[in-house]
Amino acid sequence: KNEVEQSPQNLTAQEGEFITINCSYSVGISALHWLQQHPGGGIVSLFMLSSGKKKHGRLIATINIQEKHSSLHITASHPRDSAVYICAVRPMNYGGSQGNLIFGKGTKLSVKP
Amino acid sequence: EPEVTQTPSHQVTQMGQEVILRCVPISNHLYFYWYRQILGQKVEFLVSFYNNEISEKSEIFDDQFSVERPDGSNFTLKIRSTKLEDSAMYFCASSDQPIVRQFFGPGTRLTVL
């Protein structure tokens, strides 16, 4: 069973559209990360959140700890937003260790002009 | 913005050979990580490192793998005797605290022939 599930797996949008990518997880977490992986392979950290909502430019990330769910929204999408968006969670290990990151499979976004 | 750097960008090696992948984390960061991504698959955690010792490792990180911080700037991943299945992109990351945004390097693509 995947501990981190993302949907959709693939998403094609027209430039300007509002985009939502979802992430559900099954473990207790101390933090959730949204990452962007460019076609060349490089990974950029977009957000780290443990509650509520964060906004950076056209990107908004929300998390609902009770429902074990997070969403990444892109407003006014642009072709340069085309990338794989990855959700990763840091599980809460009650032994005191901070745990490692568990990654989702990613959502491949393609924004057409 | 400061960056994590990795060298080489691409390494080709013969099965059974030792490889050392190098990373220079961001200078004031104290927590270091290695991840790998086999082509077409999700990113997987390998190991985290703090205060000159491994703080956590995954089941992937077996006796063939080791990490070291040989000086104040470099953080290395050594694979003692490479196997075909070690072919992957290896990402280094660093952070200044354990549960915060991690900064990723551009990755080293390892090809084992």
Image: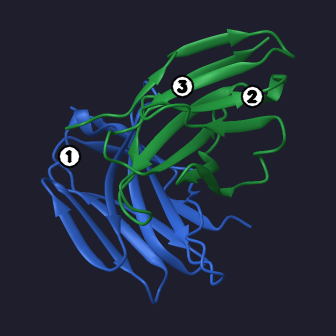
Q: How is the image coloured?
A: by chain
Q: Which labelled disc corresponds to residue A18?
A: none
Query: In this view of the protein, which residue sits in the foreground, A104 or B14?
Result: B14
Mark nearest the camera among 2 and 1 is: 2
Question: Splitting the image into 4 quarters, where does residue A95 fall?
Answer: bottom right
**Mark 3–mark 2 CB contact (< 8 Å):** no
Q: What residue is shown at x 63% (from left), y 35% (from top)?
A: B40
Q: In the image, is residue B35 above or below residue A87? A: above
Percent x, y for residue B75?
52, 34
Q: Indicate the chain on which mark 1 is placed.
A: A
Q: Colour of chain A?
A: blue
In this rendering, the answer to whether B84 lies above or below B102 is above
- Percent across and percent down for residue B102 are 39, 51
Residue name at image x 32 percent, y 37 percent: A82
Please give the letter of the chain rendered in green: B
Q: Is residue A16 left or right of residue B40?
A: left
Q: Are both tags, 2 and 1, on one chain?
A: no
> In the rendered structure, which amino acid carries the disc numbered 1?
Ser
- Horizontal relation, residue A108 to residue B90: left or right: left
In which quadrant of the rendered view does residue B56 lie?
bottom right
Q: CA distance from mark 2 to mark 1?
A: 41 Å
Residue at horizontal 45 percent and vertical 76 percent from the top: A69
Element under disc 2: strand
Q: Which residue in the protein does label 3 denote?
A: B22
